[in-house]
Image (spheres, rainbow, N blue to C red):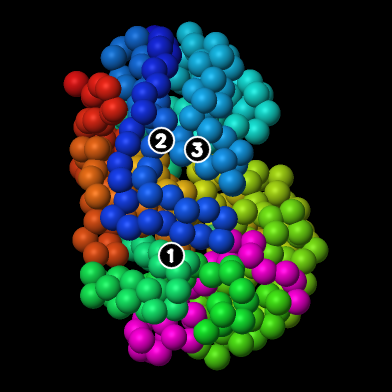
Amino acid sequence: MEVVKTKIVDIKTGIIKASLKKPFITALRRAIEVEDVIVKIITDEGLEGFGEAAPTPAITGETHGSIIEAIEKFIKPAIIGMNIEDFEEIIKKINNSILHNTSAKAACDIALYDILSKYYEVPLYQFLGGAKKSISTDITISLNDIEKMVLDSIEAVNQGFNTLKIKVGGDYKKDIQRVKAIREAVGEKINLRVDANQGWKTKEAIFAANEIAKYNIELLEQPVKAYDLEGLKEVTKNSPIPVMADESIFSPYDAVKIISMKAADIINIKLMKCGGIYNALKINSLAESAGIECMVGSMMECKVSVTAAAHLAAAKSNITRCDLDAPFLLNNDPVIGGIFYNGSDITFSEGFGLGIEKIELKNEIFGE
Ligand code: MG
């Protein structure tokens, strides 16, 4: 049998921009717009794959400049001319081309999975396993005064969301009041998740977890500092609510550590933290083998990388929760195709790969 090789011939980058309907506020940062790096990888047979990197200096340490430089100067020379069929080798080259820079790596990894599933002529979620045809997401309630958070929560419920992710991590005593007020405002039927974004100290977190447990909370996310795995373990041991690790876990190696320490009950996988779908699959497999469920979340991102995350979530039965509301929070959508929102439900376009047709960038259009 003659083997046809499909070669990577070019990698282009551009900038995508969208404004937020309202400011996105967590214990770590405040954002009013999203400006991400878009990657287009092209093969000699004319296949195009799209990817996206979100600069989050407060979380991954990356900026627009660092992402573009990592791609142009390190990743691109490492994989240009390689055959898409040698997928493992390409991913290894990307991961070894430069240390960290996980969002830059994720953008390239996503574009390669887009190409690979287009090559096999299936939607990406089917290529990855195909467990579910649709998924549903929670919606984030930004960290604000209690009154504002209550109003935002009611608005979200009226928009059709039945799971809210409440951002806390300010003063822990006031945070308990925030959760109480939201529970009283939305009633018992709405599912509540709480994310402290590292804002509490270990003892504060244990106290708060026991207090907010009175308001029927599904999970408590990243209560303490990312590097404080001992603290995270202590909270997990003493919290009546399942504890989820987010900023504490970037790589599959972090997953091994957290799982073996029993430092968390659930893991939040984000493509921007782990470097893409390849490593996300590893983390999910490690977690599943240890009896730990995963959530798939995102940074404030546009629809290219969130579509990739949604396909990943749909493909794997151990990914039981999604926090993929970012594109829903945008005023304008510069991406044609990919995922569709209907309230909290996310469905997929019929197309192969990510199903993305066109991306309107700041100065040009990808996909025409
Ligand atoms: Mg989080």
* Residue 223 spot, x, y in % from top left: 64, 67
* Residue at the spot of label 3: 55
Q: Marks 3/2: CA distance? A: 7 Å
Who's the residue at 52% across and 49% down the image?
Answer: 270
Can you tell me which quadrant of the image ligand 1 is in? bottom right
Q: Is residue 156 magenta?
A: no
The numbered mark, 3 or 2, whose residue comes first in the sequence reads 2
* Pointer 1 residue: 142
Tell me the element at label 2. Answer: strand
The part of the chain drawn in magenta is 178-203
As shown in the figure, which amino acid type bears the numbered disc 3? Answer: Pro
Q: Is residue 75 above or below residue 314?
A: above
On the question of residue 303 being in view, the answer is: no
| 351 versus 330 height, above or below | above
Locate the C terminus by quadrant: top left
- Badge 3 element: loop
The reply to whether residue 340 is in sight is: yes
The residue carrying mark 2 is 36
Q: Mark 1 or 3 closer to N-term?
A: 3
Image location of residue 147, percent across then percent down:
39, 79
- Name which residue lies at 56% across and 14% down: 73
Q: Are marks 3 and 2 in contact (CB under 8 Å)?
A: yes
Residue 193 is inside the magenta segment: yes
Amino acid on which disc 1 is placed? Ser
